Image: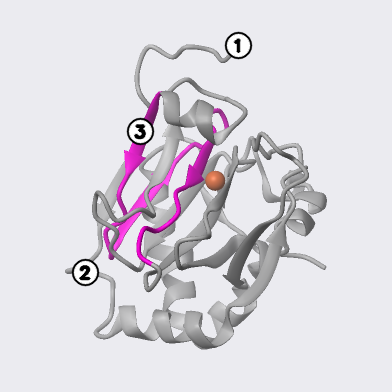
């Protein structure tokens, strides 16, 4: 039985559209996503997975951190500086970015109406998302986060959840370790959802403790 939390899931959001994002930022990222996204399958059998069927295969497309740093150096720099500074507002502990670019940031690309992102909890004490595409209410692609804490399927998340609708240029920060979450399928077959997912660390949850097996599960390490 999942723990019942008195309050809904909290998250923090910053609007970067009139600051920090260079002219043409969205098209530039979308082009890298179009050209460089690799096809992978997640098998949600890892300790942080929260799928009802741990044998299923979930298709995902990702652009790795090395490619992001090479193709979009301004975005990598944004992660290490201004986005880190935003994450810092959430905790008294010093927030750091990943020294291993492969596991620090990823572009997640979701195409068409048959894909979604696995139900899981985060390992990192602080996660960041920078939305590249807009997905208003009714169009799918929202992030669903359990208000009841750590639950074990999409259906259990759905039963009591916070729905976060992606707005291009908005950055989100949250502690996703104790609230199961997943990304809904898109409604329209033509739609593409792109988000920059970022990992941050603190002194009590440093990068060196992050299990390599998790990054292999996510396809970030070979
Ligand atoms: Fe997550």
Quarter holding the N terminus is top right
- Range covered by the magenta-colored residues: 160-188
Residue appearing at x 74%, y 56% in the figure? 215
Secondary structure at badge 2 equals loop
**Nearer to us: label 3 or label 2:** 3
- The residue at 39%/38% (across/down) is 90
Tag of residue 63 = none
- Above or below, 85 against 102 in this view is above
Q: Residue 102 lies in what quarter of the image?
A: bottom right
Which residue is identified by label 3?
A: 162
The x and y percentages for residue 119 are 58, 41
Q: Which mark is residue 1?
A: 1
Disc 2 C-beta below 8 A from ligand 1: no
> Where residue 107 sits in the image (x, y, percent)?
52, 68
Q: Quadrant of residue 82?
A: bottom left
- As measured in the structure, the alpha-carbon distance from the residue carrying label 1 to the one carrying label 2 is 44 Å
């Amino acid at each position: 039985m999942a723990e019942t939390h008195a309050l809904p899931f909290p998250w923090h959001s910053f609007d970067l559209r009139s600051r920090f994002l260079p002219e043409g930022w969205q098209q530039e990222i979308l082009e890298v996503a179009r050209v460089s996204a690799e096809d992978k399958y997640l098998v949600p059998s890892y300790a942080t997975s929260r799928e009802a069927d741990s044998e299923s295969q979930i298709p995902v497309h990702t652009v790795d951190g090395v490619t992001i740093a090479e193709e979009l150096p301004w975005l990598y720099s944004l992660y290490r500086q201004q986005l880190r500074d935003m994450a810092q507002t959430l905790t008294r502990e010093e927030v750091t970015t990943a020294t291993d670019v492969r596991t620090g940031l990823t572009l997640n690309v979701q195409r068409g109406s048959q894909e979604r992102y696995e139900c899981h909890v985060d390992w990192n004490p602080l996660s960041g998302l920078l939305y590249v595409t807009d997905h208003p209410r009714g169009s799918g692609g929202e992030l669903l986060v359990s208000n009841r804490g750590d639950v074990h399927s999409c259906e259990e998340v759905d039963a009591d959840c916070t729905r976060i609708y992606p707005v291009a240029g908005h950055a989100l920060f949250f502690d996703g370790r104790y609230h199961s979450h997943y990304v809904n399928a898109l409604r329209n077959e033509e739609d593409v959802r792109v988000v920059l997912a970022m990992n941050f660390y603190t002194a009590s949850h440093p990068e060196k403790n992050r299990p390599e097996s998790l990054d292999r599960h996510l396809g970030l390490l070979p």
